[in-house]
Amino acid sequence: MVQRQYTIMASDGLHARVAAQLVKTFASFPFVVHVSCHGKTANGKSILQVLSLGAQYHDIVTIDYETDDETQVMDCERSLSEILKATSKS
């Protein structure tokens, strides 16, 4: 498993359009993704669960990629670079 922390860079936070883009990107990869914020955890491939996190602009989210393939994780991160900004790598 690979875990990363990111800062939400979308000015309106994870609202419907941004959450849909995030979920669509995660859905294009074969591994499970969990997103955590404000003490809650969501399936990264479920728009309703991602929206339920209530993540706002500049909130820090933790994303758990259930894969050991760093190449796939980096590909996923590149796709999300306009939404998320890496804050630290674990």
Image (tube, grey):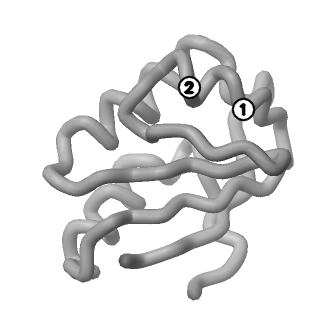
- Give the left or right position of residue 63, taking residue 61 as reference: left
Residue depicted at 25% across the width and 36% down the height: 27
- Give the left or right position of residue 72, taking residue 73 as reference: left
> Residue extending furthest left?
30
Q: Which mark is residue 73?
A: none
Three-letter code, disc 2: Gln
Q: Secondary structure at mark 2?
A: helix
**Residue under pointer 2:** 49
Residue depicted at 69% across the width and 23% down the height: 52
Indicate whether 37 appears above or below 18.
below
Residue depicted at 56% across the width and 49% down the height: 35
Q: CA distance from mark 2 to mark 1?
A: 7 Å
> Residue extending furthest top?
16
Indicate whether 3 appears above or below 8.
below
Q: Badges 2 and 1: C-beta atoms under 8 Å apart?
A: yes
Where does residue 37 sit, x and y in percent of width and height?
75, 48
To which quarter of the image does residue 77 belong? bottom left
